[in-house]
Amino acid sequence: MRVKLYSFEGLRLAVYQRAIVAEHRGQGMPPRYDYDPMKPRQNLATALSILVMTATAWAGQFLIDFATLSDAAPGPWTSFEDLVQDTAVPLADVNEVDNDVMLTPLDDSFTANNPAGPNAAATYDGVLVPEEAGNDYLYKTDDAAGTSARMKIENLDPGDYNVTVFEGRTSDGNGQFGTIWVGDAEGNGEPAEENTGDFAGQSSTVAVTIEAGDALWYRHMEDNIGGISGMIVQAQSIGPRILTRTPVDNEGSVEVDRNLVATFDREIAAGTGNITVKNLTDATEIVFPVDDAQITIAEDVLTIDPAADLKEVKEYAIQIDATAIKDPSGVPFSGISDDSSWSFTTKPPIEDALALILIDLSDLAGSAEGWDLITTNVEDTPVTDTLGIDNDVTVTITGLGDQNNPAPLKAQR
């Protein structure tokens, strides 16, 4: 990481992350924050917040600012003015890698309020929280004491997480309490008692483990005073994820002898289990143990090189057992268990396809689409057939010609 601090009409902080970490984790560039001469304390807090969050950022870190009456927290925080009952809103981790996570308020809506805030940043679970995130909060819209409402967060990648809730308001004499748990889509498995302890004017962190299909739940205990200012969800251990696939998903006309390659966001190793190449067209499959010679792992790249070519004009899907791939610390890849995440279709055999080479020797009336245009005396001009199969043909025109005496033309491979 390279950090550059400089002055231009006051304080401005720019943080640059080098690609070794960024590319491995799929991270993008952090935000850039410009100085506001009317908010000197905010400038420093925000600059430091960006610095700390960039230094500790990884896929699976979600920074949520509830209520924006005192301004939204700067990126990479996700800010919400309010939450409408049963209306899902998207969340993205600070590096915008895990982009399918959704938060849904249930039982009631949540409304923003903005009493006198702490007007200062605070550090919760290692994250510097800017004052904008702490200076306001959401409360249950029907704020009768003794009632409650839930928030459900779905599609988090499997792994261990710290879930931190906080309230910036320091004058909340009743305290703030809630319940955090992992359950199914209906919220089953909720503890009988609240488990956050009092987080009024401070924070509380609960450790949870998310498995495939689990949802993260929070129950807000309404007491008619104060509310929840924000939430931090941080993965402590999260499995490798695939960054790129070759062939890409849904690719067509794939060569039958092509290797199948997946590049991950970090170094990987073989676990136990199988990798399956499924011929969806014929309802057949080839199962490779992950330690088979046809499976190779080199740093962050998984290569499947079947000894026999695939069949022409067939739809294929790749599945990977959840135990087959892991990172060096033993955290497993969640696997691919469906036929749509990585699928492709192979191309037809050459002998069954009609491939034409079309050459236009004059552009006086314009060149036709799909034709290779050659208008001068040239040697070894490459041309392509109409199906893109025979790609090593060249054309040579020698001498001069006219409409009565065409120039000699030679095509060769």
Image (cartoon, helix red, strand yellow):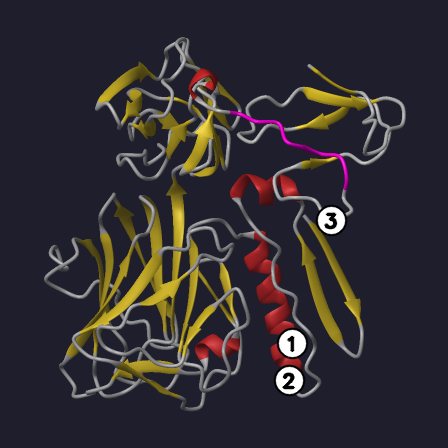
Boundaries of the magenta span: 355-362
Residue 87 spot, x, y in % from top left: 26, 73
Q: Position of residue 94 (x, y in %)?
A: 49, 58
Give the residue type that dot 1 points to: Asn
Count of numbered labels shown in the rendering: 3
Would you name the residue on which mark 3 appears? 365
| Element at label 1 | helix
What residue would you read off at disc 2? 39
**Location of residue 398 in the rendering, given as x and y in whole percent from the top left corner:** 86, 21
Camera-side residue of 314 and 226 = 314
Question: Which residue in the protein does label 1 denote?
Answer: 43
Mark 3 or 1, nearer chain start = 1
Measuring 43% from the left and 34% from the top, which residue is drawn there? 252
Q: What kind of secondary structure does the magenta stretch mostly adopt?
A: loop
User: Is the C-beta separation of discs 2 and 1 under 8 Å?
Assistant: yes
C-alpha separation, residue under disc 3 versus residue under disc 2: 67 Å
Disc 2/disc 1 C-alpha distance (Å): 6 Å
